[in-house]
Structure formats: structure tokens, C-alpha cells
Image (cartoon, rainbow, N blue to C red):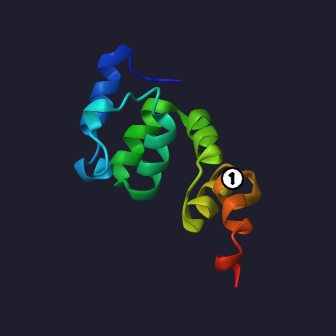
Amino acid sequence: MRSNDGASGARDLLAELSVGLFWDVDPALLDADIHAGYIIPRVMEHGSWGDVKRIWSFYGSERIRRQLMEAPSLSKRTIHFFASYFSLSQADFKAQRKLSSCKTWNR
């Protein structure tokens, strides 16, 4: 669910986020709808409070919840926070299942 209309809203979203968030890609090549699975976890992990509020306003709570649950990689801190926020189990997050299965990190 988006609060902005069309492509201009998506361009505005990316233009308003902190420049350093997308250091590894050209932000001009990102599409806010197509790449939501990349954008949302990145902002939730590394964005400022303003970035998080902007993302929340644009995507809405349900889309953010779904994208975070399916994110392949999140920090334990982010998983713990959003599991609590959304009243989910940490095991509901794909990234948590990946962390739990990594024997090296569980020693």
C-alpha cells in the first residue's frame, strides 16, 4: 500500500532517503515497488529515523512486515525489534532461520 501515486512518488521516496544507504548500487536504477525487498531491509537496518518514517509512510506496516520476514539477511537486533513490534516469533523471519542454521556462529 503506497501513500504516493505512480512513478513520481517512488522517485521522490528514493530521493528523500539518506544518500549513503545505497552505496553499493546506483539509486537511479532502483524502483521502489520492484526493489522493495532490498530497500526496506536496508533502511530498517541502516537508515536514520527520518528514513524509517518515510519508508513507513510510503509502504505501510503490512508490506514492511512481509518484506522484513522474507529478507535473507537482517541483524539479530533488527529481527528482535521487529519481532516484538509486530508480535511475531523471531523464527518467523527468514534471516533468523538462516542465522540459526549457521553452525559457525552458534559456538
Is 19 displayed left or right of 66 in the figure? Answer: left
Q: Nearer the viewer, residue 82 or 104?
A: 104
Q: Picture coordinates of residue 61 (x, y %)?
A: 57, 37
Q: Picture coordinates of residue 31 (x, y %)?
A: 38, 27
Q: Picture coordinates of residue 50 (x, y %)?
A: 33, 48
Residue in the image at 46% along x and 52% along y: 44
Q: Quadrant of residue 98?
A: bottom right
Is 53 displayed left or right of 24 in the figure? Answer: right
Rendered position, 69 above or below 77: above
Rendered position, 9 above or below 49: above
Q: Quadrant of residue 39?
A: top left
Residue in the image at 47% along x and 23% along y: 2
Is 103 displayed left or right of 11 in the figure? Answer: right
Residue placed furthest toward the top: 6
Which residue does the numbered mark 1 point to in the structure image?
Answer: 93
Q: Quadrant of residue 104?
A: bottom right
Of the residues shown, which amino acid type is indicated by label 1? Phe
Residue in the image at 69% along x and 70% along y: 102
